[in-house]
Amino acid sequence: MQAEQARTKAPRYAAICESFATDERIAALIEDPPRWDAPLRVMSALHYLVLAGRASWDDIDTALVEHADFLRRHIAQQGVQTNEVQRCWSLLPCFLEVAHRTGAAVFDVIELGSSAGLNLGWDSYRYEYAAGTWGPADATVAFTGEERRPVPAHLLTLAPVVRTRTGVDLNPIDLTTDHGIHLLKSFIWVGQDDRLARLDRAIGALRDNPPEMIAGDLADVLPVLLANRATDALTVVWQTAVLGYLPEQRRELVLQTLAEAGAVGPLAFISTSSANDGSHLYYGLTIQLWPSGERVQVAHADWHGAFIDWLPADQRTADDAVIAF
Ligand SMILES: C[S@@+](CC[C@H](N)C(=O)[O-])C[C@H]1O[C@@H](n2cnc3c(N)ncnc32)[C@H](O)[C@@H]1O
């Protein structure tokens, strides 16, 4: 599965994953039965060693022998911990769609599973779409991507102001340390050098302007944040690639927390979801707004934000099953 998803984007990563699938030395390092994200944790463990200069992709055999203890520990204890800043490119139109639909000019934003917090600075980055640009022209982090169906021009004229930004993560990554930087980079697929370079630029930007980060379980922290939210700005909660890691009951609790808070006052939720056309090769991007509670899938998007497909009105269904990833 992991090899299949990576084959076109990171052939070397895919080939290594494929060879590991039948490698008994790898099977001995992971839990039995393996959890779905075991390949991600195995690849991260090796990549961490490579980034730290302690192993080489050209000699995996030696790494498996010399660093078996580290590998076993990392694979068992280290949860998947990426922070893909290119996702901002597919998220921005969703933030703007929220501004369009609600008329809100000021946002208080909360990111669930914010990892190192890089995407909390989405409004400080520069974006390019077919219909125009958005964000400061002198930003050090700039994004472009493939538009399968274009982001509408009218959205790019909106400029909601982010008043407060809060991230919640079980293990916020501290990007002021080499360990934090190596850890974050270790989950990037081998060979995706453009992602590594973009990450370096985003790390520089975050160090200049760090967001507020709360260490904790989002299902426990969210009710507190929502109960204390201000009423003179729209609270916009979002998650990308996080809820799928929660047990179903905890995920349901999060959705229930949002619905209960939405019943009390306006609220927006943006979420990566399963695509409403049944494809398993990309995400759906779903927006839910309260007080109406209306849920709409506005786009399909690449796992890591490389493409967006902005859906026409007649393809925007979003049933209860979609908020899953
Ligand atoms: C795959 S990463 C995605 C990070 C980020 N949202 C992005 O799109 O780049 C998943 C993140 O969710 C966090 N996470 C997983 N379960 C969590 C929970 N119950 N509460 C808070 N954070 C959680 C992990 O620590 C990790 O940082």
Image (cartoon, grey):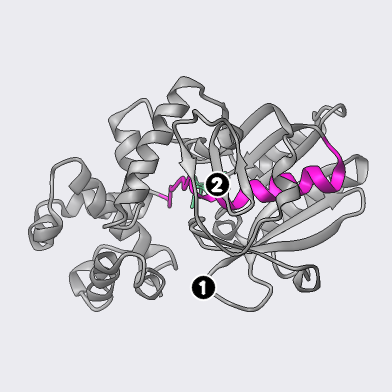
Q: Secondary structure at mark 1?
A: loop
Residue 122 falls in which quadrant of the image? top right
Q: Is residue 55 left or right of residue 175?
A: left
**Residue beneath disc 1:** 281
Residue in view at x 86 percent, y 44 percent: 102
**Residue beneath disc 2:** 128
Report the Cα–Cα distance between label 2 and label 1. Answer: 24 Å
Q: Which residues are magenta?
A: 79-104
Judging depth in this view, the residue of 87 and 164 nearest the camera is 87
Q: Earlier in the sequence, mark 2 or mark 1?
A: 2
Asked whether 160 falls inside the magenta stretch, the response is: no
Q: Amino acid at mark 2?
A: Glu
Give the overall secondary structure of the magenta segment: helix
Is 267 situated above or below 201? below
Is 177 situated above or below 291? above
Q: Secondary structure at mark 2?
A: strand
Q: Amino acid at mark 1?
A: Leu
